[in-house]
Image (cartoon, grey):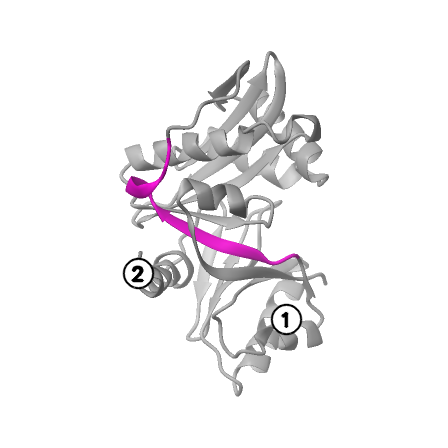
Amino acid sequence: MDHAAVLALYDRDMREGARPDEPGARIERDTAVVRRTGPPHGWNGVVWSDLDETTADTAIAQQVAYFTGLGREFEWKLYGHDLPVDLGERLRAAGFTPEPEETLMVAEAADLTLDVEVPDGIRIVPVTDPAGVDLVTDVHEKAFGTDGTRLRHQLLAGLAGDRDDVVAVVALAGDEPVSSARLELVPGTRFAGLWGGGTVPHWRGRGLYRALVAHRAEVAASRGYRYIQVDATDQSRPILTRLGFEPLTTTTPYVYKP
């Protein structure tokens, strides 16, 4: 993989060229920043910027004023190659709080190792109704220890809109939901994103995360997507590396709360 070329393509397709990805979301652009404003319970933030030492502080202040005017918390999604090199320090000085750094990993779907066995006693089923959304939300809250309200609203909105660009799946041990994840397919791009892969504590270490990655990658490949991307934690990075993913850069959420 030509890392520099794929990263440039990712920036162009997924960040500078970002598209609204759920009902009520909108993308707004100026010469230096692309931001996403979400619907109620949706995600708000800056997804791309083209700044330097002379323009960064003004752009940061403008985004703080914009989202504060809406009364919304928002995130500046900072990538390791973004400029200026001290942009993270400038964000902290403006009142942002960094969350844990992750690694942007990408693989060509054709190069992935997808012959992964599903653990014994596990069924992977698609989410097709509100009851399935409840199962995914339950796993999310147990796996990550965070509130699943935003995820629930996102998945329910997708079902109501009969959308096929968000594919959620849940792994069941009998009738117990033990792992879940989603695949986001962005029309008009070459990238499919893996998001939200989580397993409840007492089922970790049994290959569920690996199985859900392979399952979603197969779906993306069948839909014609060339690249699969994931923001990987330190825990998931070794698993993704063994499957064929390669690190391109880092990504750190900087959160501002009005």
**Is residue 23 something one can see in this rendering?**
no
Q: Nearer the viewer, mark 2 or mark 1?
A: 2
What residue appears at the point 37 percent right and 46 percent down from the top-left corner?
Answer: 186
**Within-10-Å neighbours for mark 2: few <14, some 14–19, many 20+:** few
Q: Earlier in the sequence, mark 2 or mark 1?
A: 2
Left or right position of 154 against 162? right
Q: Is residue 133 above or below residue 236?
A: above
Q: Is residue 213 above or below residue 10?
A: above
Give percent across and percent down for residue 63. Answer: 58, 70
For badge 2, the amino acid type reads Asp
Marker disc for residue 2: 2
Marker disc for residue 65: 1
Quote the CA–CA distance across marks 2 and 1.
Answer: 39 Å
> Which corner quadrant of the image does residue 198 belong to?
top right
- Seen from the viewer's position, the closer of residues 196 and 203 is 203
Q: How many marks?
A: 2
Element on which disc 1 rests: helix
What residue appears at the point 37 percent right and 36 percent down from the top-left corner?
Answer: 113
Quadrant position of the N terminus in the picture: bottom left
* Highlighted magenta segment, given as a residue range: 100-114
Left or right position of 184 against 134? left
What residue appears at the point 45 percent right and 52 percent down from the top-left corner?
Answer: 105
For badge 1, the amino acid type reads Ala
